[in-house]
Amino acid sequence: MIGDRVAERPKATAIPNLSPEVNTRVAAYRVQRYGVVVDLFTKKSVTRTRRVIEHKFVRVLWDGMKTPSEHAQMRICHESELETIRNEFCSAIGG
């Protein structure tokens, strides 16, 4: 809902066999983001069989940013649920 505090869901970002220098540069983009939902909307897409599908999206104003960005609703979770989701994610990938 609009006004809710949210976080990005965890995602696998491990890239094997990187040099330590590259790992340091990539680590800067692996930070956990938190923000506030400012809008809910749907986007329509057409399948090859000409069926119309609606996808749910949210606009989130991330902490420290000036403009909101669009994200698929399934990539976002409530801030309070993040720790549980992170534990389930780590267990699923063997972490």
Image (cartoon, rainbow, N blue to C red):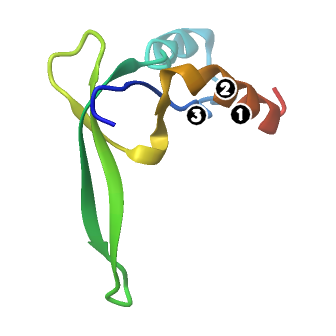
The amino acid on which the numbered mark 1 sits, given as a three-letter code, is Phe
Q: Is residue 64 above or below residue 75?
A: above
What residue type is disc 2 on?
A: Arg
Q: Name the residue rendered at 38%, 90% in the picture.
A: 49
Q: Nearer the viewer, residue 89 or 25?
A: 89
**Mark 3 vs mark 1: which is more N-terminal?**
3
In this view, the residue farthest toward the bottom is 49
Q: Are marks 1 and 2 in contact (CB under 8 Å)?
A: yes
Distance, label 1 to label 2, CA atoms, is 5 Å
Q: Is residue 38 above or below residue 46?
A: above
Q: Which x, y percent locates residue 55?
A: 35, 60
Identified at 57% across, 15% down, the residue is: 23
**Kind of residue at badge 3:** Lys
In-image side of 72 versus 14 (left or right): left
Write down the residue under mark 3.
11
> Which residue in the structure is indicated by mark 2?
86
Q: Are marks 3 and 1 in contact (CB under 8 Å)?
A: no
Report x, y in % for residue 69: 24, 33
